[in-house]
Each structure stands twice: as C-alpha cells, then as structure tokens.
C-alpha cells in the first residue's frame, strides 16, 4: 500500500494514505473567484507525482522551474522488508532515485546526488523500474512484452495522458495490443499469446508500409520491384555474364596487337590497290589483243583489174611504185604488230605478277585476321573483365532485391496464416481458461449492477479475432462520458482484485477526480460505497481525488465520507493546494 506522499519543501502538504478507501478532497472556498479554479489545487498533480516516483518519465509538472529542484518522496509497503520503503526523486535529477532502505543490494551510484539523512542507496531509474516490475508484479527478465510502466499506468490513470478515454488502455501512447497483453497478465490469461497479436501487427504494419511506399514512390518501387520481373532481369544478366565468361576464357592476349592490326590494314589496302590496277590492265590487254587482229596488210589485187577495165595498161615503173608502197605498208603493219605483241606480253606478265603478289598478300591477310580474331590487346581483355565485374555486381544487387521482394510477398501469406493460427490458439486458450474468464466477468457484473441495477446484463468477455484479442466490456447503456468513466471504474476494480488475489499486482488503485466527471449522483455514491466495501473485503487500498461538490452528490444520498477522508483537504487558496503555493 501507499503510505505517504511528501516533499523536501516545507510548504508541500504531505498526504498520508490509509488502508481501504482514501478520499483526497478538494474544496472551493466561498471567497474564491471564477479565475481561481480547483484545477490548480493539486488533485491531478498528486496522481502525477505518484507516477513520477514510481518510475514514469518527466512531465511538464516536474520540469516546472518552481518545483524542479524540489525533492519528492513516497513511502510504500514493500515485500520482504517488514517496513515501508521510501523512494525519493526530483525533477532536477530525474535519472536517479534514492531508496531507503537499500533493497537493491547495489553500491550507491553517487551518494552526493541526494542529500538525505537516512541510510539508503542511489540507483538509476532503469534499475528502479526493474525492481518495481520484479517486486510489485513478479515480472521476470525473460517476460518480454510485459511492462511495469504500462501496468503502473493502469493502477494510476492520468487524465492528461488520456487515461480515461479508453478503459482498455492506460494512455493514448500505449498500443491496444500491448495494453491488452498487460491486462491479460493481470487477469490471468495467456499474456504471451496475446502479445503475439502485437508482434504480428508490427510485422503486418511494416509489410504494408513497404508495399505502400513501393507503390506510391516510383523510386522505391524501382528498388523493391516484383519478384517475377526481377527474376526475368536476373536471367538476362546471367546470359550476358555467361557470354562474357566464354569470351574471356578463350581470349588470348596478343602483345603486338596494334602492330598486327596496322599491318592487316596495310595488306588490305595493297590488295585493293592491286585489284584496281588489274582491272585497268585487263581492259588494256583486251584492247591490245583486239588491235592485233585488226592490224592486217591492205589488199591491192583489185587495182590492176580495175585499171585494165578502164583500158589503162600499167607500165613497169607504175608497177614498181605499187610494189614500193605495198612494202611500206607491210612494214608499218609488221611494226605495229610487233609493238602490240610486246605490250600484250608485258601486260600479261604484269597481271601474272600482280595476281601472285595478291595471292601472297591474301595469305598474309588471312593469317593476320586469324591472329586478331583469336586474340586481342590486353586493354581489350581488361575492359571485358570490367564489364563482367559490373554485370556480376548487377546480378548480385538484383538477387538481393528479388529476395527482398519474395520475402515481402511471402510475408503477406505468412502473416495471414499466422493470424489464422493465432485466432485458433487464442480461442482455444480462452476456452481452457473459462473459469478465470467467469471469475473476472462475475466481478465486473457485480460491480456494474451495483452502480446501474440488476435490470442490466453487464459482462466481461474475451473474443479472439484474426487481428486482435478483444476484451469486451458490456454494460447495456449509452455511451455518455459518465457511463464510460464508470465502465472504466468497474473494469479497473475487476482486474485490480483479480491480480491482487493471484499475487500478480500491488494492493492499491488510484483514480483522478476526472473519473467522476459527468457521473450521476447515484453512481458516485454507489461507486464510493462499492470501493470502500471491496477494499475492505480484499485488504486493498483505493485512492481517489474528488471535488467536494461531486462528493456532496454522494453525501446527499446517504454516503458518509468521514471514515475515508485523508489529510490534507485541498482548497483553491494559494496556500491551500498540494504544493502550498501557486506556480
């Protein structure tokens, strides 16, 4: 149980708690103005300080410069020491607490951090949180998924954190799956099975974010892609790699590659030159051979016959001149034939020589081309190896992308299968733990009927679904804030009793006055009466901050607050609040 909430500042109004119902009442004085609201008297701050001393992160309150250096303390019963444990913490040193007595058995981190006159030890806040988990809730180091901070947030709900907006979550920052797993622990259900909903949900959310990002972002879409398209691209790259590997394996480096290539070019040019020259020579040869056939001696036999018919008798001198002319022409023809024969012979030899040279050059050209075809320069081999390395790297990157795409596609099927399996396992576990469910539902029904009468059929149940484990709180009533707050009241009372009976949770429960906002006077009276009865029955402690006008609603219906009122009684005067001054 919680015993005392105090501070090192003498202005702070120390709150001392008792067993059973504890009413920390805030009055509105007759002299107060409309601007002096009870919102500043410290009701909510009391719950916030309890959370802070029990390991919560700093809040706006503890960071306030007016109280940041103020050291707060909480005395509470602690198992195994036979006395109360005092924990001290301040906003100036939020990373440490001072424990009296030393329950950790560890040496002090820095004895000067807290100037106190009691023996004790300074421990990091992380160690204090671990100690709270172990000693108050029995959580082991291997119980991953259970959180002492989440559980304490259920025991001390804070309105500022949204603690009363959803009965199944202690604040808006805790996911429904995590909150449900921790509630299952308090209620004796298989919390590890419930935690799997959170694991599956996180995997599904990650998969959906990746798939959504790949769909909406063209760049990311290119990075991830689909496995089918990526496998096709890998096959194409494989074929290019195989071709390059074959070329490199058979590649022979020719040291004089460039010289050979230049000689091959020169040989090719000479062959082309010879072919062009041969074409000209053959045309000339044909002309020469045709000219030889046309070079014949003139026929003069017809001349004597023609002159005889004309009655002209050719004399001896004329005949002699004819013979001289004939011999001249015969000499000219002979000389031309001789010239043509010499030219023809020269051209034929020249053609034969050209063909022989072209043949030799052709053989050399074939040899050079074979060398160039079978090998290459070292630069060419190096370039081919660089291209191969690039293709291999491309294939590796594509394989990684394909594996990621396949994993993403496979994960969707696995998650669907896992959800179905989880739904079946959870349903079977609920059936096996039917007695625990009935115990919790019976308490919830009792508490809710106490507030709203026996004509309602309230119940608590667990419903295994594919994507979540639902804790159903049925009240058969409207959804007003007052009804919602009382549903939270009944549910908190239920799991607190179940957990305390089983030794899975502490014996206190703290509610801020916000839980009675909008609640009808009959339900306020019944809730306070019920809390007093249950706390007495179970040996527990219920601490609630409440405004005096809300309390008056219960008083008018016969509720006597006197046995449960604890000091101090807060009011809206500057010195009447929890801190004893305004800031």
Image: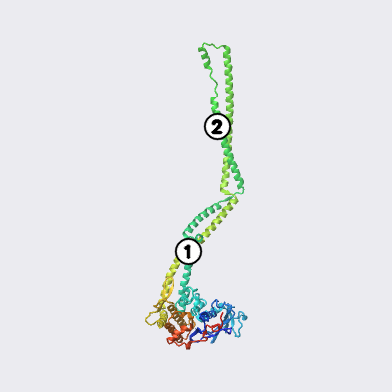
Q: Observer-nearest residue: 44 or 75?
A: 44
Q: Observer-nearest residue: 537 or 105?
A: 537
- Seen from this angle, which residue lies furthest bottom? 563
Report helix, strand or loop for mark 2.
helix
Q: CA distance from mark 1 to mark 2?
A: 80 Å
Res 535 label: none
Image quadrant in which the C terminus is located:
bottom right
Chain-order first, disc 1 or disc 2: 1
Res 212 label: 1
Nearer to us of marks 1 and 2 is 1
Colour approach in the figure: rainbow
The number of numbered badges drawn on the structure is 2
Q: Observer-nearest residue: 394 or 21?
A: 21
- On the rendered structure, is 511 left or right of 88? left
The answer to which quarter of the image holds residue 121 is bottom right
Asked whether residue 528 appears in the rendered view, the answer is: no
Report helix, strand or loop for mark 1.
helix
Expressed as whole percent of the image width and height from the top left, the position of residue 524 reads: 44, 83
User: Dot 1: within a 10 Å radius of its alpha carbon, few (fewer than 14), some, or many (20 or more) residues?
Assistant: few
- Seen from this angle, which residue lies furthest left? 455
- On the rendered structure, is 173 left or right of 458? right
User: Dot 2: within a 10 Å radius of its alpha carbon, few (fewer than 14), some, or many (20 or more) residues?
Assistant: few
Q: Observer-nearest residue: 184 or 475?
A: 475
Q: Are marks 1 and 2 in contact (CB under 8 Å)?
A: no
Expressed as whole percent of the image width and height from the top left, the position of residue 255 reads: 61, 49
Residue shown at 54%/57% (left/top)? 392
Expressed as whole percent of the image width and height from the top left, the position of residue 541 reads: 48, 85
Asked whether residue 324 appears in the rendered view, the answer is: yes
Expressed as whole percent of the image width and height from the top left, the position of residue 459 reads: 40, 79
Q: Is residue 70 above or below residue 265?
A: below
Q: Which residue is mark 2?
A: 283
């Amino acid at each position: 149980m919680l015993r005392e909430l105090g501070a090192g500042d003498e202005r702070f109004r120390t709150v001392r708690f008792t067993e059973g119902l504890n009413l920390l009442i805030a009055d509105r004085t007759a002299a107060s103005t409309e601007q002096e609201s009870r919102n500043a008297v410290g009701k909510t701050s009391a719950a916030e300080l309890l959370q802070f001393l029990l390991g919560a992160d700093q809040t706006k309150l503890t960071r306030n410069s007016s109280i940041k250096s103020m050291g707060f303390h909480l005395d509470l019963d602690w198992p195994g020491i036979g006395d109360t444990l005092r924990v001290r913490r301040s906003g100036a040193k939020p990373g440490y607490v001072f424990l009296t007595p030393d329950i950790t058995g560890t040496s002090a981190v820095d004895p000067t951090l807290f100037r106190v006159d009691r023996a004790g030890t300074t421990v990091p806040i992380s160690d204090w949180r671990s100690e709270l988990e172990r000693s108050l809730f029995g959580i082991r180091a291997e119980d991953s998924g259970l959180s002492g901070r989440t559980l304490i947030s259920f025991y001390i709900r804070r309105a500022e954190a949204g603690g009363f907006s959803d009965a199944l979550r202690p604040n808006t920052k805790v996911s429904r799956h995590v909150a449900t797993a921790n509630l299952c622990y308090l209620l004796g259900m298989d919390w590890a099975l419930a935690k799997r909903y959170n694991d599956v949900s996180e995997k599904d959310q990650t998969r959906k974010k990746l798939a959504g990002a790949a769909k909406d972002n063209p760049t990311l879409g290119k990075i991830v892609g689909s496995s089918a398209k990526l496998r096709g691209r890998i096959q194409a790259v494989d074929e290019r790699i195989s071709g390059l590997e074959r070329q490199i394996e058979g590649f022979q480096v020719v040291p004089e590659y460039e010289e050979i290539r230049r000689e091959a070019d020169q040989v090719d040019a000479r062959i082309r030159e010879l072919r062009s020259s041969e074409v000209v020579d053959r045309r000339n040869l044909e002309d020469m051979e045709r000219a030889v056939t046309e070079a014949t001696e003139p026929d003069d036999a017809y001349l004597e016959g023609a002159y005889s018919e004309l009655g002209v008798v050719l004399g001896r001198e004329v005949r002699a001149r004819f013979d001289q002319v004939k011999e001249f022409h015969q000499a000219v023809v002979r000389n031309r034939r001789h010239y043509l024969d010499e030219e023809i012979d020269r051209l034929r030899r020249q053609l034969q020589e050209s063909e022989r040279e072209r043949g030799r050059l052709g053989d050399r050209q074939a040899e050079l081309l074979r060398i160039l075809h079978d090998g290459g320069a070292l630069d060419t081999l190096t370039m081919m190896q660089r291209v191969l390395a690039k293709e291999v790297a491309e294939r590796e990157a594509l394989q990684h992308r394909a594996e990621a795409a396949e994993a993403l596609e496979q994960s969707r099927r696995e998650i669907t299968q896992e959800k179905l399996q989880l739904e079946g396992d959870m349903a079977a576990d609920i059936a096996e733990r039917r007695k625990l469910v009935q115990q919790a539902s019976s308490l919830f029904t009792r508490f809710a009927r106490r507030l709203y009468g026996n004509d309602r059929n309230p119940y608590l149940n667990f419903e295994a679904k594919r994507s979540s484990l639902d804790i159903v709180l049925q009240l058969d009533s409207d959804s007003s804030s007052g009804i919602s707050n009382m549903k939270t009241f009944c549910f908190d009372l239920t799991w607190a009793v179940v957990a305390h009976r089983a030794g899975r949770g502490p014996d206190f429960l703290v509610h801020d006055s916000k839980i009675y906002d909008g609640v009808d006077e009959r339900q306020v009276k019944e809730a306070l009466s019920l809390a007093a009865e249950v706390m007495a029955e179970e040996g527990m402690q219920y601490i609630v901050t409440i405004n005096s006008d809300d309390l008056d609603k219960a008083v008018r219906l016969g509720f006597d607050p006197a046995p449960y009122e604890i000091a101090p009684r807060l009011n809206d005067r500057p010195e009447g609040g929890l801190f004893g001054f305004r800031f």
